[in-house]
Amino acid sequence: MSTLGPGAALRAEAARVLVAVLDDGRSLKAVLSAALPKIADPRDRGLLEAIVFAALRHERRYTFVLSRWLTRPLPVGTAKDRAVARLLLVGLAQLDALGMAPHAAVGATVDAVKQLGREGLAGLFNAVLRKATREPWAVPDSRAVRTSHPDWMVRRFEADWPERVDALLEANNTEAPLWLRANAPRVGREALAARWSEAGIASESGPARDGLRVLERANPTQLPGFDDGAFHVQDLAAQLAVEALGPLQGQRVLDACAAPGGKTLGLMSAVGDGGEVLALDVDAKRLERVRSLVQAVSPSRARFEARAADAAEVGSWHDGRAFDAILLDAPCSATGILRRQPDIKAHRREDDIAVLAATQARLLEALWPLLTPGGVLLYATCSVLREENDQQVAAFLARHPDARLEPLDARFGYDTGHGTQRFPGEDGGDGFFYARLVRAG
């Protein structure tokens, strides 16, 4: 057992998570899913997450500031060296984004240097982090560095949303609230909110029919109703995607890219006991989690089937029967959910966008003929880039005279002319795009 301060091991683990994400290119979600179960105290798990998220949200700015204080770069030749170097991001995240007491943040981070076996650097770390508590931080000229976004992404935002770009960049660096969807008809939203209120947990409703926003930091697994499937975690914007399809009672519905399954649950509730939902996903492991979620949580007696398949390869999975409605939550850049997945900033590349747009068009073309006359396809992404959203829909409409774009009301977002765009932070929700496409009868 280490004789160092109790926070040293946690800071060292935060640095190792950053190495895995920033240096090894791994998914933050995957790395945390392996790291968090090893930490016994839920408060420590929460702190680890908070530090890592803050460091990733502000990495470019922190790196710029550190470059002004370090006379030479730290060694990064080994995995241990890289973890020590990333500890400086851990230190700045605590002082800046998390507002921790300087003596606690600096002390624990310097102890983490020793925990990682680089005692000789403890003095340097102590000096740099104490400087960060006393001196003004250098302010970058570049908007991209100042807001810790890739240069190409800021250029895209400026071109697509010049009047909204500052608010968009700020929202991307803000902690996302916890949204949950009441599992109707098992329990209504008001009844669930009352149950939480009795337990001293404040919440508020939003534009989504069954959505509740928890007004304090909370672990959803500790909320009343979790164990009996009264709710599931799902952002406001994702909940609205199911509602944008319109009334679905008794219909046959395709969830074309179903994982992780929250929208599948919403569809099961919407179609009712006489309906049918087919969930597809190209990733068999993720689809199994969708199947398990539906079996564990959904109170609906609607017919449900899950198949591992590429939705665009229709011949490999389609039984010849048409669908009344299709939800296509298409693979995208995820630029609308950077506040939830800040590692996207490090991993996404500009040339990914054209590849993703081609995949989206391929899916639209493959699925459109599967609709009944008068049926509805809801095209959705968690992107804020026009190339993936309204430009994609405009091109689709030009190719398909049998398709009609049906407008959505203001609660779904801003009318782009070829769909409806929500921006991150609006009503507390994520950035999302919806286009309700109706096939001619």
Image (tube, rainbow, N blue to C red):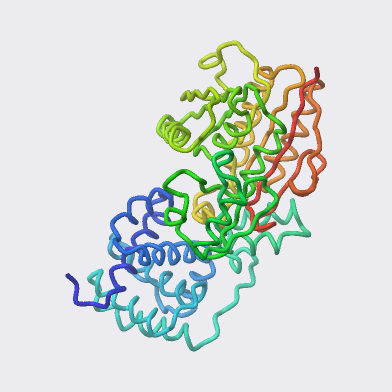
Q: Is residue 295 left or right of residue 110?
A: right
Kindly tell me whether residue 82 is visible in this rendering. Answer: no
Q: Position of residue 46 (x, y in %)?
A: 41, 63
Total numbered labels placed on residues in the image: 0
Q: Is residue 421 left or right of residue 359?
A: right
136 lies above or below 272: below
253 lies above or below 229: above
Which residue is pictured at 69% across the width and 57% down the height? 427
Q: Position of residue 432 (x, y in %)?
A: 66, 46
Frontmost residue, 40 versus 166:
40
137 lies above or below 321: below
Extreme-left residue of the structure: 1
Q: Where, quadrant-wise, is the C terminus in this rendering?
A: top right
Kindly tell me whether residue 238 is visible in this rendering. Answer: yes
Quadrant in the picture for residue 39: bottom left
Quadrant in the picture for residue 183: top right
100 lies above or below 390: below
Frontmost residue, 229 versus 403:
229
Q: Position of residue 34 (x, y in %)?
A: 33, 51
Q: Where, quadrant-wise, is the N terminus in this rendering?
A: bottom left
Which residue is pictured at 69% across the width and 43% down the height? 433
Q: Is residue 364 left or right of residue 280?
A: right
Quadrant in the picture for residue 165: bottom right
Which residue is pictured at 64% across the width and 41% down the height? 381
Which residue is pictured at 69% across the width and 28% down the height? 377
Q: Position of residue 162 (x, y in %)?
A: 77, 57
